[in-house]
Each structure stands twice: as structure tokens, then as C-alpha cells.
């Protein structure tokens, strides 16, 4: 089974040199800690920054310099600031190569729900709907089941939808899944996890074919 | 031409009950602190506020919510605010949640003189309910209208007496867009300089969009999520 950092590390292997990447809040943020050597990526923060750097050293926080999670951050050489319309303009125009975000539910046709639990959590979609509607490649990082033990990889989302047919890949503590016309295709499995466990915890259509390699951690 | 006023109180003197106001800022970053405080002091009510966020309980637009001055909030994300949640769930406050890029681009459209935009954000979701859609090159888009608002209130880092504005770092965010979208735009700045001092190549918002400008005071610039790496 993978922990949060190992999920992030596995996703980081999807990064290619020259990628512009938008990382969501939570596990996706951790991906920045595992950028492979020799790979240069530029991180986009949708509040108006390309070239996001690490958190500042204590005492060097700047109230004017935050990320989309409202955390104080820094910039790296080559960074650029812009307004929110241009920020979503570059997303809409398909200039951002990869978006990594969390989800409450993903369906086997690539639908995603991650913004609202009716009656419980109604905080708003922020930039999630814009990102999922336009990003070329969307990877979801999430736990395989919810707190009640129910599968989050479903045949149909039960929560309000954020976007339709947009997720390309899901990485959970149990494995890596490509989303194709056939559903969730298990392409790698986490160490110590059995295929039966993956089957038991996946409600949506699951495809397991041939030898499934174990994720290197 | 005289766009300069002395303070926030003077700048917002024509803001009255029931108006629609666009406000710049992302979270607490780049919000027009002085004008918000002045609107709280003035007690203007039944406002519709269009702003990406709604502040926190005791800062920013949250202060106006506490005084029940806001009738409707149009935002993309409204977490981190208990009073907001209470008013929303009790039905005292009307809330319209819209995707962040749609919010930004509807403001931009107003400033560019375009009545609508088409965006794929929200297609197939509850955001799309009742909205016209069109298919371009096989992809479905929602038609969204440019904002119409009585006032826009923004905060810039520097401005000159003709209303030209320069923003700093990520406090730019929605400010230049809101500035373009108001019928009457108020800019508060950390530093107001005489005309001619700003390099024309560095201007983010040309003064044509700004009706009124003043140098703000006592900026708190509160940080919402202070995250640091420890000194080694």
C-alpha cells in the first residue's frame, strides 16, 4: 500500500522535461517534492503565477505572494505574474500540460466529482471546473475508498459533477489506473496489495490483464 | 482631470444600499482593505458583492458579512468563513458559486465591451443549468454573460494621479479585471505618485478604467496560510 508521499512520488514519474504543471491542494502539492532529476517543470498557480518555488524561509514571507491554497510561497528564476483571466486563459487554451488534483469520486468514464457534498460541504469549485474542462492531461491523486469504506472508483459519480469524461489516470494507495473506454485499467499495483483487494474496493468497471507490475517505491 | 480623493470614506461616498460591487483580491491577498472598512463604517446594506472569495470571519468581506450588509455573494470559493456558512445555510445570504476562470473572464468581457463569453467550464454540471450552450469544433461551451456592476473596488501597489495602476506579485489576481468591469471604478493604492512617474511600459491597468484613486493607510495585508521552511 502506498502512503501519500509515495502516491505523489509515483505521479511525479509522469512529469516530462518542459512540462507546465498545475498541482491541486493536498496530495498533488506533494508531487513538487519528487520531480525527477534532469526534468525541469514549471509550476502554475492559478491565482496568477508561473514558476512557483518552495515555501519561504521563516521571516521572508510576503503577503503579496501566495499560491492557490493561500499559502505563502516563493518564485523561482524565470517566473511570471499575471491576472486571473490570463491564468485561466492559458489553462483553457491547453497550454498547461498536466493537471494533478484530488477527488471525492471518479467514474470509469472519466467523470470527476470533487467540489460539493450537498448539505455538508459547499465551499465552491474554485478553479476545479475550469481545470478539468480544459486540461490536456488530468491525473487524480486520491484514496481508493472514503472514510465509510466505500469505493471512490465508481461506475457513476453520486456527488455533484465537476467535469465530464476528463480524468485520464488515477493513482491511489492501491495502484495506478488508466481510464479507457473499458473502464479503470490497472496498470501497476502497490506493494503488498492483492488483485482481489483492488477488485473488492473498486465499484466501477475494472480491467486487469496480464502481469501487473508492482510500483517501485 | 481630478480623480484623487483623500481617503476611502470619500471614495465610497456614492455607494448605496442595494448596489452591485465588484471587488478585487484572492483570499486576503490584494483586497481593498481601506474601502471595505469604510463600507463597514458607513453601514451600506443589501449589497451584491462579486468577489472570488468572501474574506475570513474577522477580515475583508467577512467584516461586511458580520454586519449583515451583503444580500448576495457571487464567488468561486467561500471556505474558511464560519459566519458566511451560517448565513448561507440559514438562507439569510444568497450565494452564487461560479467557476474561478468564468468569474475572471466575465469581468474581463465587461472591460473589453463583449456581452458574453463561451467557456467549457461547468458543462454537464449544475453550473450549466438554464444556460445556453453551443458546440464549437465538437466541444460544448456554456454562454456566460459579462458582469454588470455599479462599482468596482480594487487595490493596487502603486498608482498615479491619473489612475494608472501597477500591481505587485500575486496580489494582482482579479484586481485588473474588476477594475475594467465597473461602471465606476475606485482604486486604493499603497503608494500614490504624481503623473509621469510610472513607466508607461509597466502599467497593468490604464487610468481610463479608473474613476477615483487614493492612497490607503494602515495596510494589514493579513496572511491566511503562513507556511514557511525553517531556517537551517
Image (spheres, coloured by chain):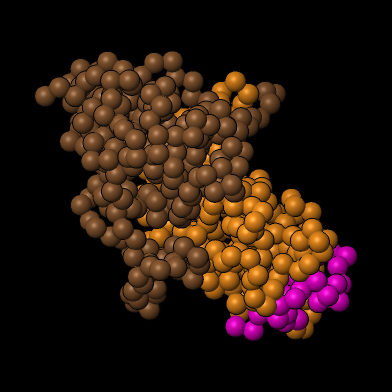
Chain colours: A orange, B brown
Identify the residue at horizontal 21%, vertical 20% (top origin): B4
Left or right, residue B120 beside residue A195: left
Q: Position of residue B68 (x, y in %)?
A: 49, 34
Identify whether A31 is placed above or below B23.
Answer: below
Q: Position of residue B20 (x, y in %)?
A: 33, 42
Query: Which residues lie in the magenta part?
Result: A181-208
Q: Any magenta on residue B143? A: no
How many numbered badges does the structure rendering display? 0
Left or right, residue A121 beside residue B77: right
Identify the residue at horizontal 26%, vertical 34% (top origin): B185
Q: Position of residue A203 (x, y in %)?
A: 75, 76
Q: Position of residue A132 (x, y in %)?
A: 51, 63
Identify the residue at horizontal 44%, vertical 67% (top origin): B128
Left or right, residue A134 beside residue A217: left
Q: Which of these two is toward me, B109 or B49? A: B49
Identify whether A164 is placed above or below A9.
Answer: below
The image quadrant where one finds the C terminus of chain B is top right
Identify the residue at horizontal 46%, vertical 63% (top origin): B127
Q: Any magenta on residue A207? A: yes
Q: Can you see residue B132?
A: yes
Q: Which of these two is toward me, B175 or A92? A: B175
Amino acid at each position: 500500500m502506498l502512503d501519500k508521499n509515495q502516491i505523489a512520488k509515483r505521479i511525479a514519474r509522469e512529469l516530462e522535461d518542459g512540462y507546465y504543471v498545475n498541482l491541486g491542494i493536498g496530495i498533488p502539492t506533494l508531487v513538487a517534492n519528487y520531480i525527477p532529476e534532469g526534468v525541469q517543470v514549471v509550476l502554475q498557480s492559478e491565482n496568477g503565477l508561473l514558476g512557483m518555488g518552495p515555501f519561504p524561509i521563516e521571516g521572508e514571507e510576503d503577503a503579496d505572494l501566495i499560491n492557490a491554497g493561500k499559502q505563502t510561497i516563493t518564485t523561482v528564476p524565470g517566473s511570471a505574474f499575471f491576472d486571473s483571466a490570463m491564468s485561466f486563459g492559458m489553462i483553457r487554451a491547453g497550454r498547461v500540460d498536466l493537471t494533478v488534483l484530488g477527488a471525492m469520486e471518479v467514474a470509469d468514464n472519466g467523470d470527476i466529482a470533487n467540489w460539493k457534498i450537498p448539505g455538508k460541504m459547499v465551499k465552491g469549485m474554485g478553479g476545479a471546473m475550469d481545470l478539468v474542462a480544459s486540461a490536456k492531461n488530468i491525473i487524480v491523486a486520491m484514496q481508493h475508498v472514503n472514510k465509510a469504506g466505500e469505493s471512490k472508483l465508481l461506475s457513476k459519480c453520486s456527488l455533484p459533477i465537476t467535469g465530464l469524461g476528463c480524468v485520464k489516470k488515477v493513482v491511489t494507495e492501491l495502484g495506478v489506473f488508466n481510464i479507457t473506454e473499458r473502464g479503470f485499467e490497472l496498470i501497476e499495483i502497490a506493494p503488498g496489495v492483492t488483485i482481489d483487494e483492488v477488485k473488492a474496493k473498486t465499484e466501477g468497471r475494472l480491467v486487469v490483464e496480464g502481469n501487473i507490475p508492482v510500483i517501485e517505491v | 482631470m481630478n480623480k484623487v480623493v483623500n481617503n476611502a470614506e470619500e471614495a465610497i461616498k456614492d455607494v448605496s444600499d442595494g448596489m452591485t460591487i465588484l471587488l478585487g483580491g484572492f483570499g486576503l491577498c490584494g483586497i481593498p482593505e481601506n474601502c471595505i472598512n469604510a463600507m463597514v463604517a458607513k453601514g451600506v446594506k443589501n449589497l451584491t458583492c462579486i468577489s472570488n472569495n468572501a474574506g475570513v470571519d474577522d477580515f475583508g468581506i467577512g467584516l461586511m458579512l458580520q454586519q449583515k450588509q451583503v444580500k448576495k455573494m457571487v464567488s468561486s470559493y467561500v471556505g474558511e468563513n464560519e459566519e458566511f456558512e451560517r448565513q448561507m445555510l440559514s438562507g439569510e445570504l444568497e450565494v452564487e458559486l461560479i467557476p474561478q476562470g468564468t468569474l475572471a473572464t466575465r469581468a474581463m468581457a465587461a472591460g473589453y465591451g463583449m456581452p458574453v463569453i463561451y467557456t467549457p467550464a461547468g458543462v454537464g454540471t449544475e453550473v450549466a443549468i438554464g444556460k445556453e450552450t453551443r458546440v464549437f469544433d465538437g466541444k460544448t461551451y456554456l454562454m456566460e454573460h459579462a458582469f454588470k456592476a455599479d462599482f468596482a473596488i480594487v487595490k493596487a501597489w502603486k498608482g498615479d494621479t491619473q489612475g494608472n495602476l501597477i500591481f505587485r506579485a500575486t496580489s494582482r489576481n482579479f484586481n485588473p479585471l474588476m477594475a475594467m468591469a465597473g461602471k465606476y471604478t475606485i482604486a486604493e493604492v499603497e503608494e500614490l505618485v504624481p503623473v509621469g512617474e510610472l513607466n508607461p511600459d509597466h502599467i497593468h491597468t490604464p487610468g481610463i478604467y479608473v474613476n477615483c484613486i487614493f492612497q490607503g493607510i494602515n495596510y494589514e495585508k493579513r496572511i491566511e496560510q503562513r507556511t514557511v521552511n525553517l531556517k537551517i
